Amino acid sequence: MTNDRTRDRSRGDRDGDPIPTDRESPVGSPVIRGDESVAGSHAREAVQFDPDDPARLADAADTVRQFASGDTNDDHLYMLRGAAACAALVRGEGSYKAAAERAGGTATVSFIRKWARVHDLPRSVRKQVALGRIAPTAAKHIARVGGEARLLLAWATLDGSLTVREVRSVASAVNDGVPIAQALEEHDVELGRIELVLPPETYRDLRRTASIDDAEPGELVAAALEEFLN
């Protein structure tokens, strides 16, 4: 259930448009939860929380109340659903305080704010949460960081196998003004380091070319990827 707007934006990124660091699809829309390649058969059950629809807003309030109770069984898709409900409820009610009052139960302003931020993460990050590669609790801390550092922290979380506690520490450091690369170094993670598995023939030719050109393999890969991605 990926809408045309999302697909168009994804193509636009390769045409030189700024890489999105925030959500671009409508609030409450199940872009990831409704994607069968990610959610499988559960995609058909994805709920859209339209903040402008009173019935859907009531559903969002019920979902937030249940979500805040803690009965999630660590289900990543359910957590994304709860995050969507939080974001839609805030948009529909106009404030975090009003959203918390509407949801009731154990839903607090802090709880709703944290999960609404997760819903506002870009699609590329939310997809990794849905697949279980980035823990939803780690995503809450990634969402605290703004701009490009948000994406860099998300990918470093994957490539550096950062724990939730480490992600929280890096996010806090970045928000205190520490450069993302420096904050990651404190946890022995080198920004930009990624392990690649290449076909033997490609590996052979990469090493051969790097040797002849007196270059590091990573330099050649970076140059080729920059041309491809742009």
Image (spheres, rainbow, N blue to C red):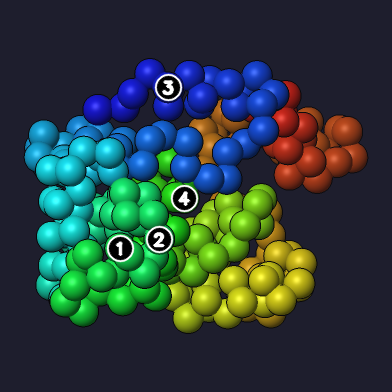
Question: What amino acid is labelled 1 in the image?
Answer: Ala
Q: Tag 3 or tag 1, which sits nearer the N-term?
A: 3
Instruction: Answer with the quarter of the image where residue 211 lies.
Output: top right
Q: Which residue is mark 2?
A: 95
Q: Tag 4 or tag 1, which sits nearer the N-term?
A: 1
Instruction: Answer with the quarter of the image where residue 25 lies.
Output: top left
How far apart marks 2 and 1 lie (CA) works out to 6 Å
Q: Is residue 137 visible?
A: no
Where disc 1 sits, the SS reads helix
Question: Disc 1 vs disc 4: Cβ atoms closer than 8 Å?
Answer: no
How far apart marks 1 and 3 lie (CA) works out to 28 Å
Question: What amino acid is labelled 4 in the image?
Answer: Leu
Q: Viewer-proximal residue, 151 or 228? A: 151
Compared to residue 198, the image places residue 69 above or below, namely below
Q: Which residue is mark 3?
A: 5
Q: Which residue is mark 4?
A: 121
Q: Which residue is mark 1?
A: 99
Q: Within 10 Å of the Cα at label 1, are there few (<14), some (14-19), or many (20+) other Cα atoms? A: many
Q: Where residue 41 appears, x then y in whole percent? A: 10, 37
Residue in the picture at 19% in, 53% down: 60
